[in-house]
Image: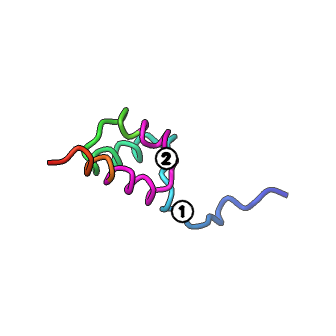
């Protein structure tokens, strides 16, 4: 028997869904990136939000003011 679609679990906010354009767009805008730059970071790091945030911080620290 199939699962009951009305019983939905909590969303996983610790992951960024690369398939959802609005999530990638929000992440990109949040960090001042283009969509392409955001996707490039996701390709390197994965979709874990904390790792993505850390990677962006490292990139901006290297670039300087």
Secondary structure, mark 2, is helix
Tell me which residue sits at (54%, 62%) in the image. 11
Displayed quadrant of residue 32 = top left
Query: Whole-Å distance between the Cαs marked 2 and 1?
Result: 21 Å
Write down the region rendered in magenta: 39-57
Q: Is residue 45 above or below residue 7?
A: above
Would you say residue 45 sits in the magenta stretch? yes
Tell me which residue sits at (35%, 36%) in the image. 37
**Residue bearing the label numbered 1:** 11
Q: Residue furthest right?
A: 1
Residue 47 rendering spot, x and y as whole percentages: 51, 50
Tell whether label 1 touches label 2 (CB within 8 Å).
no
Mark 2 or 1: in front is: 2
Q: From the viewer's perspective, is 23 left or right of 46?
A: left
**Residue bearing the label numbered 2:** 45
- Residue situated in front as seen by the camera: 27 or 8: 27
> Local crowd at mark 1 within 10 Å, few (<14), some, or many (≥20)?
few
Q: From the viewer's perspective, is 34 left or right of 40?
A: left
């Amino acid at each position: 028997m199939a699962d009951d679609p009305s019983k939905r679990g909590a969303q996983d906010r610790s992951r960024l869904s690369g398939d959802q354009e609005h999530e990638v767009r929000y992440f990109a805008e949040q960090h001042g990136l283009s969509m392409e730059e955001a996707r490039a970071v996701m390709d390197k790091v994965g979709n874990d939000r904390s790792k993505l945030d850390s990677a962006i911080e490292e990139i901006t620290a290297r670039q300087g003011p």
